[in-house]
Image: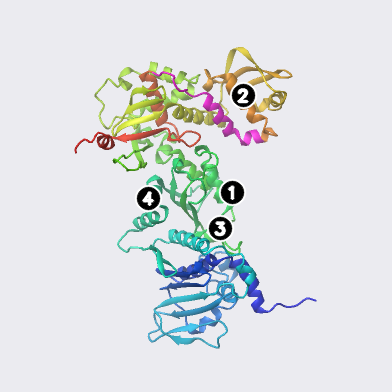
Amino acid sequence: MIRQLDARLINQIAAGEVIERPASVVKELVENSLDAGATRIQVEVERGGMRKIRVRDNGYGMAAEDLPLAVAAHATSKIATLDDLEAVASLGFRGEALASIASVSRLHIATRRASDERHGWQFEPGADAPQPGTCQPGTSIDVSDLFYNTPARRKFMRTEQTEFRHIDELLKRLALARPDVDFILQHNGKVVRQLAASELLSAEQAEQQRLRLICGKAFVEQAQLLDEHSAHGSGAGRQGQGMSLRGWIARPTFSRQQADMQYFFVNGRLVRDRLVAHAIRQAYKDVLYHGRHPAYVLYLAIDPAAVDVNVHPQKHEVRFREQRQVHDFLFGSLHRQLAGQHASAAALADGDDDNARLQVGHRRVDIGGAGSSALFSRAGQRFAGDQSAPAQYAHAQLRDAGGAYAYLAQAAQQRSAEAISVESTNHDDASMPPLGYALAQLQGIYILAENQPGLVLVDMHAAHERVTYEQLKRAYADQQLQAQQLLLPQQLAVSEREADAVEQFAEALQAFALDIERSGPEQVSIRAIPQLLAGADSEALLRDVLSELVTLESSVLLEQQANEMLSSMACHGSIRANRKLNLDEMNALLRAMEATERSDQCNHGRPTWLQLDLATLDKLFLRGR
C-alpha cells in the first residue's frame, strides 16, 4: 500500500543527502552567514561537532515572522522564480538546509536585525512562536546532539579528531573564497584557527595574507599569479567568452604527493568538478612526475546563467552549459602560464619584435647558516626583444638543425665570438641574457654560467631534453617532422609481438618521422629517425618506442599519447652526461633554453636550472661579517 510520508520523515530523508557529517552542518550554516552579508563568522564545536556546533555571525539577521519559515522545508528568501534558479548568485538557494538539520538534531536560533533596537528573537523548531531574547546583531545557530534520533547514522561517524579535521579543512576552503571576512574556529573551548581580514589592507594584500595563513609560506613563494580573461571576437577567439580566471598556481617542482592543496571556486562557490580537474591535469601533464599532483588556488568567474549549481545535494558539483568552452579556457589559461607565454608571446606571434619580451623564471637558493633550510622562490627576468638576437638565433638553429647535438655546434660556429665569448668583459646589465654566459662544465653534468644576479647552475641533460621535446611537439603538431635517412638500414632483433606492432602502427610511426619496417618474424629494419634526433642511439630509441607500442590497442591511442611518445624520443636525443661541451655549445644551449617554453623543468617535472645570487654566495663565505 502506498503511503504519503509525513513531513518529519521527508526532512530526515533529505538530511541523509545534505547532512553527511558535522562538517556538512558547518558548511550550510556558514554559507547562510555569507549570504546574509556577514563580515565576521565564529564557529564553535564540541567533540568534533557531534555534541555541539554553534555558528555566530554579524549579518543582516532575521525578522520574528521569518523564523518559523526558516526551518520549514523549501522555504527561502534567495529565489522566487525559475529564472532566479537558472541564475543563482547566492551560495544557498534550496531552502532545505535548516529543515534537514533540525530533523536530525536539537536546533536553536537567536537573531537580531540592526534595526531592532530593543531585543532580538529566539526560536526552536516545534515552538508556538519566536520569543524575545537578548543577542548581538546578526544570527547565532546552535546545533546539539547531531543524529541523536538517527543512531544508524551516528555509527558511521569517525573519531572526534577526524570529524574536526573535516570541519577545519572546510573552513579553510571557505576562508580562501572570502578573504574579506573574519573566520574564527574553536574546538572544545580552544581557539584553533583565527583568520582576520584587515580593513587596512588592499584586496590583493588581503588575498596574499589569507593565502599565506592557509596554504603556507612555501606555497606563496612558489606560486605564480594567474589573471586571464576570456578572448572576444569570432571563431576560436570566442572560446571562454565572458569568463575570467584568477588565482595562484604553484610551480611544477612544488607538486604534492596527494591532491590536498587544490582549491577551485566558481563564482565564489567551492566545487569539485571532473571537467575542471581534467583541464588542470592536462595543463600540467608535460611538467609533472607521474603520480604527483599540482597545487593551486583558482577562482573562475562566469555568468551565473551559464552554470547549473543545482546538480548535487551538497552543491559540491556544478554543470557548465558550454563544457567544451570552459574546459578549453581553463586548459589554455594554465597552459600559457606554465609555458611562460604572456604578452611577450603575443608580441612575437604578431611579429612585433621591438616590443617582444622573453620571461624566464629562476630559482634562488637561500642558505642562511647552520640549521637553516633551503628556500626556493620564483622570480622573473625580462629580456628586451631588441637584445635577444642570440636567443632568437639559437631558437632558429634548434628548429632547423639536423641532429641531436648539431644545433649546438652549428650555432656556436656561425655566431660571432663577440656575441657569446665569456672572455669579453664588456657586458652591461641591460644586454646580459637572463641565463648569462657559460663559464665551465662541472663533472660533465652541469653548466656553470654567470648572469646579472650571480651564478646559474644548469642540468644540461634535463635542459636539453626539454628543448628537444618542445621542438618535437611543435614539429609534430605542424606535421613538419623531418626524417633523417640512415646511411645503412639498421637491423634489430625484437619479439614477435613488437614486430607485429611495427606492422600495425607503420602509418602512425611515419608521422613521428620513424621509418621502420618488418624484415622477419622477429626482426625489424630502421631506415630513418627524426632529423632532430640524428646522432642519437637509434637502437635504444626504437626499443623504448616499441615498448610503448605493444601496450596500445589502436593507432587512435597512439595519437592520444603522442606527447608521451615524443617525450621518450626526446630523452634519447638529448645531451648525455659526461659529454664535453665547449663554451660556444654551452652558450647555445643557454640561449635555446631562454627561447623555449617550460624550460624551467624537464619533461618529468625536475628543475633544469637554479640561481645562486651574490647575497647567497656571500653568506656561504661569511663575507661582510
Which numbered tag is attached to residue 324? 1
Magenta run includes residue 578: yes
Viewer-nearest residue: 283 or 377: 377
Cα gap from disc 2 to disc 1, whole angstroms: 37 Å
Cα gap from disc 4 to disc 1, whole angstroms: 35 Å
State the extent of the magenta-drawn residues as a range: 557-581
Q: Residues within 10 Å of mark 4 (few under 14, many from 20)?
A: few
Cα gap from disc 4 to disc 2, whole angstroms: 45 Å
Nearer mark to the viewer, of 4 and 1: 4
Q: Earlier in the sequence, mark 4 or mark 1?
A: 4
Task: Tell me, yes or no, whether the two marked residues, 4 and 2, touch with CB atoms within 8 Å.
Answer: no
Read off the residue under disc 3. 306
Q: Earlier in the sequence, mark 3 or mark 4?
A: 4
Cα gap from disc 3 to disc 2, whole angstroms: 49 Å
What predominant SS class does the magenta segment belong to?
Answer: helix
Which numbered tag is attached to residue 261? none
